[in-house]
Structures are given as structure tokens and as C-alpha cells.
Image: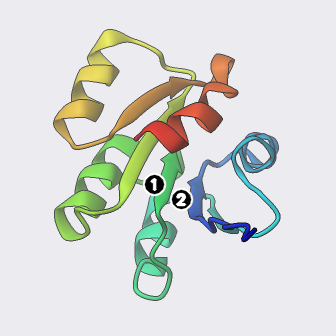
Amino acid sequence: MKILLITMKYMIIDDNVKIREIIREVVSKETDTIMEFNSGEEAFEALNYFMPDYILIDIHIKGTNGLEITKKILDKYPDIKVIIVSDYDMPSFHSVAKKFGAVKFISKDNLLLLRENIFIT
């Protein structure tokens, strides 16, 4: 019997180190590759050499906000799946996230939902 290992690549963008650690623990397996960034600008530049399967991004980060970075990323790289992970769980933010192409919006209060949503999207 063969065992198939699925390796994922993630980019986590949040200016809170502790939140990045929690997200990493929730979504990743030993075989996954993860890059973490404080700002959207740094992450966008890294897309020149690292193409993730998923980007997990907060709305309020250093520099340009996460919604604008989501739009910028998906305008250039439409095949990347972006999930907004934020404390700002308001309908207006959900609407803008969807409009800009995010596949999901997860509240930081429910980070365990990330794991199941990674495999559904």
C-alpha cells in the first residue's frame, strides 16, 4: 500500500508573531513549507520566488491593509487561494474580501476553522 503525502505551501501575513505561530500550528504538517511576513509589501515581493498554495492574511497589518494586498496579489496571481484571517469579523469586510477574490474569511476567534477550510477550498 502506498501512502500519498500532500505537501502544501503557505504564506502567513500578520504583524502579530503569536498569531502567526498559532496559525502555523493549526494549518501545517511536518512536510509543509511556510513563509511568514509582517507586512503585505514584503509578502508580495516574496511571490517572485515563493508561490504558495494558500495565503492567510490579516486585514490590519503594517503598511497596506490586507484587503488591498489581497486584491494586488490576486490581480497578478489569480490561482493563489487567499483566506482572510482577522479580528474584524464584520459583514462589510466579508463583502470587500469576497469582491477582491478571497476564498474565505475566518475570524481569529475560530482559527480551528482554518484547517477544515484549507481542504474544502
Determine whether 39 is above or below 93 in the image. below
- In the displayed structure image, the side of residue 82 where residue 32 appears, left or right: right
Can I make out residue 73 in this image?
A: yes
Residue at left offset 50%, top offset 71%: 42
| Residue 63: percent from left, percent from top | 45, 54
* In the rendered image, the vertical position of residue 33 relative to residue 78, given as above or below: below
Q: Does residue 68 appear to the left or right of 50 in the view shown?
A: left
The label number, if any, that marks residue 39 in the structure image:
2
- Residue 39 position within the rendered picture, expressed as x and y whole percent measured from the top left: 53, 59
Front in this rendered view, residue 69 or 2: 2
Residue 84 percent coordinates (x, y)? 45, 37
Residues at discs 2 and 1 in contact (Cβ within 8 Å): yes
**Around disc 2, counting alpha carbons within 10 Å, would you say few (fewer than 14), some (14 to 19), or many (20 or more)?**
many
Looking at the image, residue 120 sits to the left or right of residue 91; the answer is: right
Residue at image position (54%, 29%) is: 86
Q: Amino acid at mark 2?
A: Ser
Per the image, the residue denoted by label 1 is: 63
Report the number of numbered marks. Answer: 2
Tell me the SS state at disc 1.
Answer: loop
Q: Quadrant of the N terminus?
A: bottom right
Identify the secondary structure beneath mark 2.
loop
Q: Residue at x 33, y 39 (%)?
A: 103
Rendering coords of residue 34 (x, y %): 67, 67
Q: Is residue 29 above or below residue 44?
A: above
* Quarter occupied by residue 93: top left
Colour mode of the rendering: rainbow
| Of pointers 2 and 1, the one earlier in the residue sequence | 2
Amino acid type of the residue that numbered disc 1 sits on in the rendered structure: Gly
Give me the C-alpha separation between circle 2 and circle 1: 6 Å
In front: label 2 or label 1: 2
Of residue 114 and residue 49, the one placed in the foreground of this image is: 114
